Image (cartoon, helix red, strand yellow):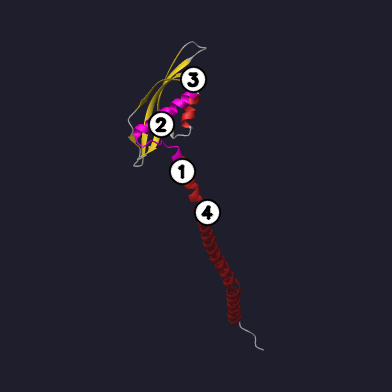
Amino acid sequence: MKKLSSREKIFAIAGVAALLAYGLAEFVVLPASAIWNNGEERIALAQRRLRRERELVAARQLPARVAAARAQLQQEQKRLLQGKDANQAGAQLQSWLAQQAAAQQLEVLRSDFLPPAPVTAEFVRVPVRIELHGRISQITAYLAAVTQGNQIASVDEMQFSSYGDAKQKQVHCVVVVSGLMAKGG
């Protein structure tokens, strides 16, 4: 058996190293990268599947959501003024405001219709000015009842003046309250 020269030893070692590098790449690195790539593909596939399932769940819930929105719309439509025109709606609002004042034991000094104003193509704002007299606690309760009552109403203007002694402090209040009416009754 002949001894290998140093040059031949270097070639043999380089050949073995190349063979080991090829084996490492072929049997370790490439399968591991394929697993990582498969993992990425699986994640993307799982994300698409999850998105599709969420869409299906949302589609199943859609009729219930539409029904709930319709019920809420009907509830809010009941809170609109129900007159056939702005004059009837104004009279309805004026009567309702007077009832709310009576419930708070306020004295109604005067009540006036103001010109209606369109809000959108479908709705008209019907304002009423009402002049009240009473204690501040009654006025506060009245305003709460009006803004949170069974009519869609907003307070557009408010003026206060007080008089009387410290124990019987009275308040004179002028309020413009607007109701909402659908066009065409």
Q: Mark 1 near mark 2, Cβ–Cβ under 8 Å?
A: no
Which amino acid, by three-letter code, is at mark 2? Gln
- Tell which tag, 4 or 2, sits nearer the viewer: 2
Q: Which residue is mark 4?
A: 61
What range of the chain is rendered magenta? 77-102
> Which residue in the structure is indicated by mark 2?
92
Check disc 1 and give the amino acid type.
Gln
> What's the CA distance linking mark 3 and mark 2?
26 Å
Task: Identify the image quadrant of residue 118.
Answer: top left
Q: Which residue is mark 3?
A: 136
Residue 30 — which label? none
User: Residue 1 or 40: which is nearer the viewer?
Assistant: 40
Nearest to N terminus: mark 1 or mark 4: 4
**Helix, strand or loop at mark 2:** helix
Q: Is residue 185 left or right of residue 149?
A: left
Residue at 50% in and 47% down: 68
N-terminal-most mark, 3 or 2: 2
Question: In the image shown, does 29 or 160 lie closer to the viewer?
Answer: 160
Mark 1 and mark 2 lie on one chain; the one further toward the N terminus is: 1
Asked if disc 3 and disc 2 are in contact, CB closer than 8 Å, the reply is: no
Q: How far, Cα to Cα, is label 4 from label 3?
A: 48 Å
Report the residue marked by disc 1.
74
Work out whether 120 lies above or below 20. Answer: above
Q: Earlier in the sequence, mark 1 or mark 3?
A: 1
Circle 4 — which element? helix
Give the CA distance from mark 1 to mark 4: 20 Å
- Secondary element under disc 3, as helix, strand or loop, is helix
